[in-house]
Image (cartoon, rainbow, N blue to C red):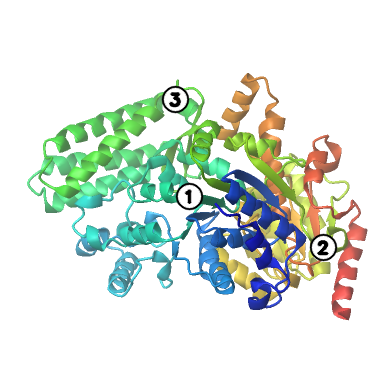
Amino acid sequence: MASIRKEVAAAFRSEGPLARHIAGFRARNAQLQLADSIAQAIDNQSVLVAEAGTGTGKTFAYLVPALLSGQKVLISTGTKNLQEQLFHRDLPTMTAALASPLQLALLKGRSNYLCLYRLEQHVAHVPVAEPQLMQDLSLINKWAAETQTGDIGELTYIAEDSKALPYVTSTTDNCLGKDCPVYENCHLLKARKKAQAADLVVVNHHLFFADLAIKDTGFGELLPQMDVFVFDEAHQLPDLACDYFGEHVSSRQLLELCRDLDLACKTDLRDHPQLRKITDKVAQQVKDWRLQFPVEPERGNWRERSQQPQMQSMMQRLTETMDLLYQVLKESLGRSEAADHCFERLAQNRSRLQKLNDTSKPDVSLWYDTSRMHLTLHLTPLSIAEKFREVVFAGQKSWIFTSATLSVDGGFVHYQQQMGLEQADSLLLDSPFDYQQQALLCVPRYLPEPHQHQAMQQALLQTAIPLIQANQGRCFMLFTSHRMLKWMADVLPEQIRQPVLVQGQTSKRVLLDKFVQLDDAVLLGTSSFWEGVDVRGDALSLVIIDKLPFASPDDPLLQARMEASSKQGGDPFAAVQLPQAVISLKQGVGRLIRDVTDRGVLVICDNRLVTRPYGDVFLKSLPPMQRTRDLTRTLQFIADKDAAKRSD
């Protein structure tokens, strides 16, 4: 196979196709290094783990070798938004510049595509007499006659969380597959066929792991065809992989099963009142099961919770009723395709529930989480390294894992061990930004310890007010807990004149657009705003972080991993908690400087950065900014920054 390294280098030259076709394009040294290393990995059919600091231009660095390789390429991104940005913005720019004739495809998970069969079923039998639900179903039904792709993303005039969407999309549980009456017109099937015929396919991590784990019909046929796999935002993979290689049962799944079975009872099995009665009983017991947990959402250890006498009694009743439903439904097999499929789903859920009630199983975490309406039980393996190693090193293929935040303390040991990639090549590229000139890190003096909640709240407020006022807003305040965010959202608007935007008020995209448009706002956010947010220029020049993002010690998955590390003779804090927190902090810090002309201030309100030995690990992993503990100096930096901007 001919090397593509020369072609890749030529594409990035000052007189090359990228410079000729993309206004203002100029390759950076780190970008060239990354593109060359990726080209080499493709040539050698090897595995590469690469951290490329913010501003490297890693998207172009992997797209050029991917498009020039002449091989079948799968690119996986962290979110659907990034997936669409890559497919609709970056790829068209790149294919035009390189005059690439390749066939491209965008493939999302099944819940992103309209299911014509389920739409027909639920428009005919509206599930609940709610005006908004009925209106949304009517709008979707009209759109169904117009859409070519069936991509739910086209439905911009329906709320993202519309109650109608679960009724008109399928899951792996309720999809009828080849038994579906409208199988040949299936939008998901068409999207998968297009992906199978394409030279380059863009997916997201959730879809990749969901289908890898369950070998879902269709996409499982796509993976073996691929020669090159590129994972952007690869720092997200370890937790996602663990989740998808595990098992889970949710009250939502069980209630949807009961709802679909009830629909079959109203149509094909109207002469079977006993079946409908038992179905209703299972549905009621599932709702009662949720009531065994607090109203407010929480996560907890299922091993411990399942041992409570009341919970054991509840689980026994639910299991017995599901067993009865299984026996009664079994007698009606062959009379209804929909009911037959419900029987298969019931069998799967009984089996999963049995596994999740086996609390003696080693090397896994058994945990639960609840929302306002539902609960989910999870069985999560503590490590997927062995399984994923088998996938990656099974054949002669190229695998590239890249992100701005993969290393801890200058190395990749933690990430490679998590993913089973110890044999992979690695590359660490610093950001091309001049952080010494562009940014200042302040860790204020005299802050209380983070566990002193009330004192910390007041200290954070008093620290933030003068900084926000001096910077005229243009600030992200990032929190490690919803409790602190909620408190700040209540008190901050009364203390400053700048507008305060709060996560959850509206969608993330609308909130960010409003933040940029206002030009003097303060945005309060938790985990979803720590990464994947790109606000360039003056609109964001101050980031305040309340404390180091250590995962909650009550987190059941974290507890299980720490116990496993301890049993193996390791240091659970150094091996599990610390690396995870370092990578999370690097993500939050990365919101500040997004371009060569950006200047800004980062304030981390956590004394542990300077009072604990592990603080050095965090500091070594952050960009080389100027540092201070003096708020007066910080305010002066802001004044100088604004003065310099006015003089430009």
Disc 1 packing (10 Å; few <14; some 14–19; many ≥20): many
Q: CA distance from mark 1 to mark 3?
A: 34 Å
Residue furthest front as drawn: 2
Residue furthest left as drawn: 271
Secondary structure found at label 3: loop
Which of the 4 quarters of the picture holds residue 12? bottom right
Q: Observer-nearest residue: 626 or 4?
A: 4
Q: Quadrant of the C terminus?
A: bottom right
Which of the 4 quarters of the picture holds residue 513? bottom right
Q: Which residue is mark 1?
A: 206
Rendered view: 215 above or below 633: above
Q: Observer-nearest residue: 619 or 302?
A: 619
Q: Observer-nearest residue: 594 or 522?
A: 594
Q: Earlier in the sequence, mark 1 or mark 3?
A: 1
Percent x, y for residue 443? 84, 50
* Residue 549 visible to an observer of this rendering: no
- Tag 3: residue type? Gln
Secondary structure found at label 2: helix
The mark closer to the camera, 1 or 3, is 1
The mark closer to the camera, 1 or 2, is 1
Residue at 43 percent of width and 66 percent of height: 153
Q: Which residue is mark 3?
A: 308
Q: Earlier in the sequence, mark 1 or mark 2?
A: 1
Residue 2 left/right relative to 196: right
Secondary structure found at label 1: helix
The mark closer to the camera, 2 or 3, is 2
Rendered view: 321 above or below 15: above
Q: Which residue is mark 2?
A: 467
Residue at 58 percent of width and 51 percent of height: 42
- Tag 2: residue type? Leu
